Image: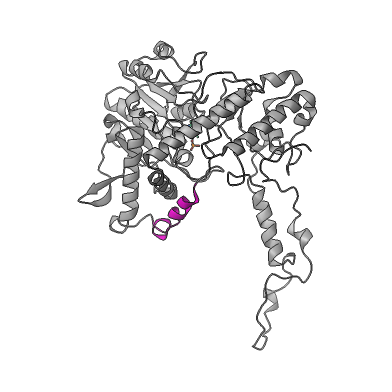
């Protein structure tokens, strides 16, 4: 195979332990018996399970190899657009594991949880500063839950003003969770088409905005990796009809330190700490989707809230207009510790550099690959860029084939078939933590795949060739998930 392995997360075969066992081999040495043997009640013994006999190193190697089948950002580049699969400093793992944090019981009285509460309070302050918003809740445990919280806040706001509204505007470049969160809150999502340059215009919003519409959910930067440049005008349009502006800020790594979101007319914004602010994520692990609001929405924030009085911190339930609790306890607290450590270590300059590098890397890839793959929106992007399989269609090679073939080169595929407005989309987000050398390897792999599509399309259609499993029944996996084994 001609592939140049970018990374080698792929161990190609590993037999079952049963195949490796050798009768009589053991993994431990018991001390010599120095007491008389006592017969064991035969009812308690009998035939045990047929476990294989193995040495310790065989077991260690077996499980270490299996663990390497799971592709992770510590093993190689993971350019999954919108997901920000970046390297997370290990120092933050250490802070999250500190006994006082990791062992804090959720029912600790505030007097014994001052450090925990202080960290949360300070983190709220840091996030308010980064976003330019007035108040923050750390309760939502994921981006999508942050969106739901935001919708509930907007709903509470309208209810307090005497008229609940029924619709919410969601552009076609929004993240997929946006319309779902709006619907979960009882709103009917109203789609707005983005214009030919990939962003939403204030005119298009003006055409659908009315007094039945609670507001707009704008993903910014949007899923094409573009900044919604009209955001101020859009906000004015929505506000003029009494609506509220929700910004999905999950991809803050594209704008932090550069854009003051609070000045763009946004009323509510959520962040994904597990994307921008250090926490290894994916696979359904814990996340954190803090919600930041302007002053007028603060009374509705989830309770309890952390307050400081005379240098002491406590949780207060005294918020009669609050939308209530979003979860019982802060089970995702470790994510907050990592984010706090990350922000404090980076400082304002460091965070600004994260943005700069994330944007630079994405644009480097965009420019380098635009001869090989079709670029539907050919303009500078922020932290990610979106290609399509249009150039490869003549050879009957699809985005799925390209993604599968890329795995043979040792890279995780990018996000595919999203955003929906690009047919056969490949959404690439390199993040700021990849070196130029690694990005060049990725570009080289992508170019090789494009050449192969011309010369030997069957090679792509039957890919991957080097992975443990080949093509899977993805519809079956989604419809009939078998999570047990
Ligand atoms: C990841 C993402 C979300 C959803 O976040 P989860 O934590 O996975 O629920 C929402 N919006 C955008 C733009 C995202 O990138």
The vertical placement of 405 against 60, above or below, is above
Residue 334 in sight = yes
Residue 428, percent from left and from top: 58, 30
Residue drawn at x 72%, y 72% is 46
Taken as a whole, is the magenta stretch helix, strand or loop?
helix
- Please tell me in which quadrant of the rendered image residue 107 appears: bottom left
- Please tell me in which quadrant of the rendered image residue 149 appears: top left
Span colored in magenta: 89-105
Looking at the image, residue 230 sits to the left or right of residue 194; the answer is left
The vertical placement of 68 against 358, above or below, is below
Is 96 colored magenta in this rendering?
yes
Residue 407, percent from left and from top: 69, 37
Q: Nearer the viewer, residue 61 or 354?
A: 354
Is 214 colored magenta in this rendering?
no
Q: Quadrant of the N terminus?
A: top right
The vertical placement of 309 against 473, above or below, is below
Residue drawn at x 65%, y 81% is 31
Residue 78, percent from left and from top: 59, 38
Determine the residue located farthest toward the left in the rendered image: 310
Q: How is the image coloured?
A: one colour
The vertical placement of 308 against 418, above or below, is below
Q: Nearer the viewer, residue 73 or 359?
A: 359
Residue 468, percent from left and from top: 73, 44
Residue 413 in sight = no
């Amino acid at each position: 195979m001609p592939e140049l392995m970018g990374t080698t997360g792929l161990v190609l075969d590993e037999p079952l332990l049963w195949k490796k066992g050798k009768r009589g081999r053991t993994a431990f040495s018991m001390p010599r018996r120095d007491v008389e043997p006592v017969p064991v009640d035969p009812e308690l013994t009998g035939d045990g399970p047929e476990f294989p006999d193995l040495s310790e190193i065989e077991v260690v190697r077996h499980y270490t190899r299996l663990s390497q089948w799971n592709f992770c950002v510590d093993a190689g580049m993971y350019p999954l657009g919108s997901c920000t699969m970046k390297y997370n400093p290990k120092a933050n793992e250490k802070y999250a594991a500190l006994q006082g944090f990791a062992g804090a019981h959720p029912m600790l009285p505030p007097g014994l949880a001052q450090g925990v509460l202080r960290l949360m309070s300070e983190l709220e302050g840091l996030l308010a500063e980064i976003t330019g918003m007035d108040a923050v809740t750390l309760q939502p445990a994921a981006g999508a839950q942050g969106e739901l919280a935001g919708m509930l806040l907007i709903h509470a706001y309208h209810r307090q003003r005497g008229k609940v509204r029924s619709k919410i505007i969601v552009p076609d470049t929004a993240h997929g969770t946006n319309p779902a969160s709006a619907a979960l809150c009882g709103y009917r999502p109203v789609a707005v088409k983005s214009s030919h340059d990939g962003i939403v215009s204030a005119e298009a919003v003006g055409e659908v905005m009315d007094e039945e519409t609670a507001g707009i959910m704008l993903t910014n930067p949007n899923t094409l990796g573009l900044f919604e440049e009209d955001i101020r005008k859009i906000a004015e349009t929505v506000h003029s009809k009494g609506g509220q502006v929700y910004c999905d800020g999950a991809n803050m790594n594209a704008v932090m330190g550069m854009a003051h979101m609070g000045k763009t007319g946004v009323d509510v914004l959520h962040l994904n700490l597990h994307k921008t602010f250090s926490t290894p994520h994916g696979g359904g692990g814990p996340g954190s989707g803090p919600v930041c609001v302007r002053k007028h929405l603060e009374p509705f924030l989830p309770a309890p809230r952390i307050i400081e009085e005379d240098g002491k911190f406590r949780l207060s339930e005294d918020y009669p207009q609050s939308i209530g609790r979003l979860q019982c306890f802060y089970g995702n607290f470790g994510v907050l510790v990592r984010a706090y450590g990350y922000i404090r270590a980076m400082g304002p300059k460091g965070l600004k550099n994260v943005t700069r590098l994330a944007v630079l890397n994405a644009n480097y890839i965009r420019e380098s690959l635009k001869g090989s793959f079709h670029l539907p929106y050919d303009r500078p992007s922020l932290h990610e860029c979106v290609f399509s399989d249009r150039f490869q269609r003549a050879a009957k090679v699809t985005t799925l084939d390209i993604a599968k073939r890329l795995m043979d080169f040792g890279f995780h595929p990018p996000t595919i078939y999203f955003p929906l407005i690009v047919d056969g989309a490949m959404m690439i987000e390199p993040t700021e933590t990849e070196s130029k050398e690694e990005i060049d390897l990725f570009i080289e792999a992508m170019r090789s795949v494009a050449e192969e599509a011309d010369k030997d399309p069957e090679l792509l259609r039957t890919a991957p060739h080097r992975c443990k499993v080949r093509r899977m029944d993805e519809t079956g996996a989604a419809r009939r998930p078998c999570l047990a084994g």
